Image (cartoon, rainbow, N blue to C red):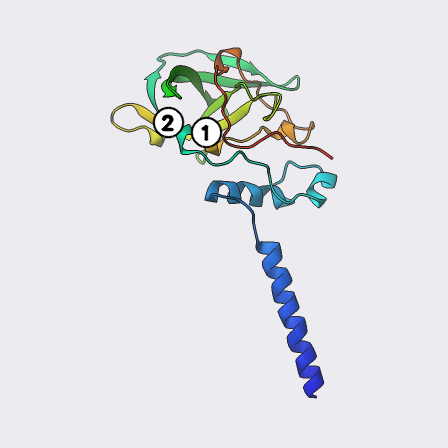
Amino acid sequence: MKKTTILLCIIAILQACNSQQKRAIVGATEYQQQLNASYKDASKTPLKKKDLKIFKGLDFFPVDSSFIVIATLEKITNAPTFEMATTTDRTALYKEYGYLSFSLEGKKHQLTIYRSQDDLKDVAFKNNLFLPFTDATSGNESYGGGRYMDVMTTDENSNGTITLNFNNTYNPYCAYNDKYSCPLTPRKNHLDATIKAGVKVFKKY
């Protein structure tokens, strides 16, 4: 009887350890942990089955506070709807929302931020703004098609500024699986800078 009890205790401990290992999500920040968790979730992940089987976590640049900047927002009034090219024949409808001006490593930059017209139809995404960009790392250390940053319109303060955290940038789904259709970064949104922040290029197996 004692042997059975001891054996059951050992099994319970091992199961608890395995459960904790399964729940453990890698990431240096809450953002990284949440992104890794969604990629490990088979119901949400953009990864191919063969990549998901060996997936342990995305590769990120070290978190660097110098890549968190305050940008001045200049809104664009009466911007026309246009078709943004994608990685497939599909076109996505967007409007230019405004210009973001900021300084990074002592140099001034400007990016155009967009609003998806499809997102306006969904209450959950109506406040989302879309910021795609490329930089000197694109095609080498980061995905060649550029990276994305999600910005909320509620991030604006009374001074007309938006905080941009390049540590919280991510790759489009098509960086992991070519079945997806992803907006292509407009040429005007190439940064003449080296943004070693956020997610790195994904190494496929």
Residue at 35% over, 31% down: 155
The quadrant of the picture occupied by the N terminus is bottom right
The quadrant of the picture occupied by the C terminus is top right
Q: Are marks 1 and 2 in contact (CB under 8 Å)?
A: yes
> Of callouts 1 and 2, which one flags the residue occurring earlier in the amino acid sequence?
2
Answer above or below: position of 15 versus 43: below
Q: Position of residue 109 (x, y in %)?
A: 40, 15
Q: Amino acid at mark 1?
A: Phe
Question: To which quarter of the image does residue 127 belong?
Answer: top left
Pick the front one: 130 or 66: 66
Q: Is residue 2 left or right of residue 30?
A: right
Q: Position of residue 204 (x, y in %)?
A: 70, 33
Q: Amino acid at mark 2?
A: Val
Q: Position of residue 113 (x, y in %)?
A: 43, 20
Residue carrying label 1: 166
Residue at 58% over, 18% down: 184
Could you tell me which secondary element the residue under label 2 belongs to?
strand
Q: Is residue 66 left or right of residue 192?
A: left
Question: To which quarter of the image does residue 110 belong?
Answer: top left
Residue carrying label 2: 69
Answer above or below: position of 192 versus 125: above
Q: Position of residue 33 (x, y in %)?
A: 52, 45
Q: How many numbered discs, if any?
A: 2
Label 2: how many residues lie within 10 Å, few (<14), some (14-19) or many (20+)? some
Residue at the extreme front of the image, as rendered:
106
Answer above or below: position of 120 versus 31: above
Pick the front one: 20 or 126: 20
